[in-house]
Amino acid sequence: MGQLVKGLSEEQLKLLPTEEDVVFYEEHGWFISPKILPDELLDEAFLGAQKFYRGERDARIPYEIGSSEWEPADGDAVRNNQHVSYRKKELRKLLQPIIGAIAAKLARTRGVRLFEDTLIYKAPICNNARGGIVGWHTDYAYSSVCTSSKMLSAWIPFHDIDREGAPLVVIDGSHKWKGNEHMRTFNNQDLQQIQKNFFLQLRSLLKFQ
């Protein structure tokens, strides 16, 4: 447990997943933690995100291609910016040891490392507009340079949400599906077509097994 608990307080240790939680995660592919970040930190990160959207930067990444980079001229449907913790100090503060410890516990490993981070804003959908729809996709498809099969995504909402109104949906058990390793369809808003294509691909895979 040495690496796993490094930097955690007694209170944070109590927030780590139990063995029952880990088994649930392995079966369903998702896990909802108790509250692990204080409101003050989330409020500061939210204000940092607003500054980021206004163009304020504390650091610059040394390249301009190869990652998603929303700009005001792109419109407001879905904003997607990567590597923001490197470029805005308020967002960097979200990289708390407790998050890595939870991820490591779920993956049954002694340590994890951050591959990338993303700041996403989805505009509300009004009048049946397509608006802030994000296409069904797999995060692994966007991290294909990694050889590990134990990758996790940690989602940190800046607002209070519940299961009925959450802006993020995870398909229960889909981490066990075959044929979705290359679903780079984040920007595809035609959800019915994505579903059709996936099941056609799945049917093809089953046919040749």
Image (cartoon, rainbow, N blue to C red):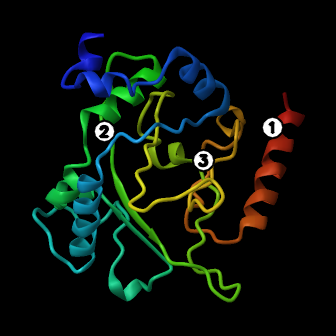
- Amino acid type at circle 2 is Leu
Alpha-carbon span between mark 3 and mark 1: 14 Å
Callout 3 touching callout 2 (CB < 8 Å)? no
Residue placed farthest to the left in the image? 58
Quarter of image, res 35? top left
Residue 114 at what x, y percent from top left? 30, 38
Q: Nearer the viewer, residue 168 or 186?
A: 168
Q: Is residue 109 visible from the viewing direction of this image?
A: yes
Label 1 packing within 10 angstroms: few (<14), some (14-19), many (20+): few
Circle 1: element type: helix
Classify 10 Å Cα crowding around label 3: few (below 14), some (14-19), many (20 and above). some
Residue at 46% in and 24% down? 17
For the point 25% across and 33% down, which residue is it?
Answer: 97
- Residue 29: quarter of image: top right
**Snapshot quadrant of residue 103:** top left
Asked whether the viewer can see residue 64, the reply is no
Q: Nearer the viewer, residue 207 or 76?
A: 76
Frontmost of labels 1 and 2 is 2
Identify whether 12 is placed above or below 110: below
Q: Which mark is residue 182?
A: 3
- Which one is in front, 191 or 28? 28
Task: Give the CA separation, mark 1 to mark 2.
Answer: 32 Å
The disc label shown at residue 114, or none = 2
Which residue has dot 1 on it? 205
Q: Is residue 152 above or below residue 196?
A: above
